[in-house]
Image (cartoon, rainbow, N blue to C red):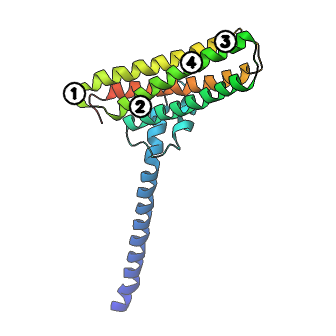
């Protein structure tokens, strides 16, 4: 009888091992997908959802909650704003634009500088949220990012009547910064609306 039960026991053991292996793979997959799921779910209703996902899906360390994600969005925006500011400054220092184009470029550098300052303040605020001052801090963050977006839009408007070789490149880069700023503002608004306390 023992020899008849052995094949059944081995079969049962094999099925159990296969099941355990499958469950382990599923758990690992869920753990891997969690940050990506957070980004996708949070970016769905952003003004520029595809850009939101692209700019945040590879951010490291992976955001684990809405406030982490808002911080990541502001960090990405800050990095791009600095890059564009350096780009515009190089144009001013290495080319000889006409008077109207030079004025637009100079104004843009100043506006980007203000945006960078506002984004830095926002990031600091999001990193130090406290339960007792949460609403006030979130209001600050929303105000500063809104101001940064206004500065970027003003920079774009300044090139509308400018005819110069730098116009297309600068407007393209500023437009990208304005879009990630808009997404960052949306993600900050989500934190403010869905949480009544700091992280």
* Residue 46 visible to the viewer: no
- Residue in view at x 75 percent, y 17 percent: 97
Calculate the distance from the C-alpha at mark 1 to the C-alpha at mark 4: 35 Å
Q: Helix, strand or loop at disc 1?
A: helix
According to the image, label 4 marks what residue?
110
Q: Which marked residue is nearer to the observer: mark 1 or mark 3?
A: 3
Calculate the distance from the C-alpha at mark 2 to the C-alpha at mark 3: 30 Å
CB under 8 Å between discs 3 and 4: no
Relative vertical location of residue 78 with respect to residue 151 in this rendering, above or below? below
Calculate the distance from the C-alpha at mark 1 to the C-alpha at mark 3: 45 Å
According to the image, label 2 marks what residue?
123
Q: Helix, strand or loop at disc 3?
A: helix
Quarter residue 22 falls in: bottom left
Nearer to the camera, 185 or 28: 185
- Quick check: 160 left or right of 37? right
Q: Helix, strand or loop at disc 4?
A: helix
According to the image, label 1 marks what residue?
132
């Amino acid at each position: 009888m023992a020899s008849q039960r052995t094949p059944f026991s081995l079969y049962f053991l094999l099925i159990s091992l296969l099941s355990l292996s499958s469950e382990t793979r599923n758990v690992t997959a869920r753990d891997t997908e969690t940050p990506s799921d957070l980004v996708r779910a949070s970016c769905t209703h952003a003004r520029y959802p595809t850009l939101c996902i692209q700019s945040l899906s590879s951010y490291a360390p992976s955001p684990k909650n809405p406030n982490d994600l808002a911080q990541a969005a502001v960090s990405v925006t800050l990095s791009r704003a600095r890059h564009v500011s350096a780009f515009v400054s190089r144009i001013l220092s290495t080319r000889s634009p006409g008077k109207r184009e030079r004025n637009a470029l100079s104004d843009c550098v100043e506006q980007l500088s203000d945006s960078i300052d506002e984004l830095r303040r926002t990031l600091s605020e999001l990193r130090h949220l406290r339960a007792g001052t949460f609403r006030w801090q979130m209001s600050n963050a929303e105000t500063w990012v809104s101001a940064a977006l206004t500065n970027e839009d003003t920079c774009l408007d300044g090139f509308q009547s400018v005819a110069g070789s730098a116009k297309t490149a600068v407007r393209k880069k500023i437009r990208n910064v304005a879009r990630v700023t808009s997404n960052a503002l949306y993600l900050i608004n989500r934190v403010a609306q869905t949480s009544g306390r700091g992280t």
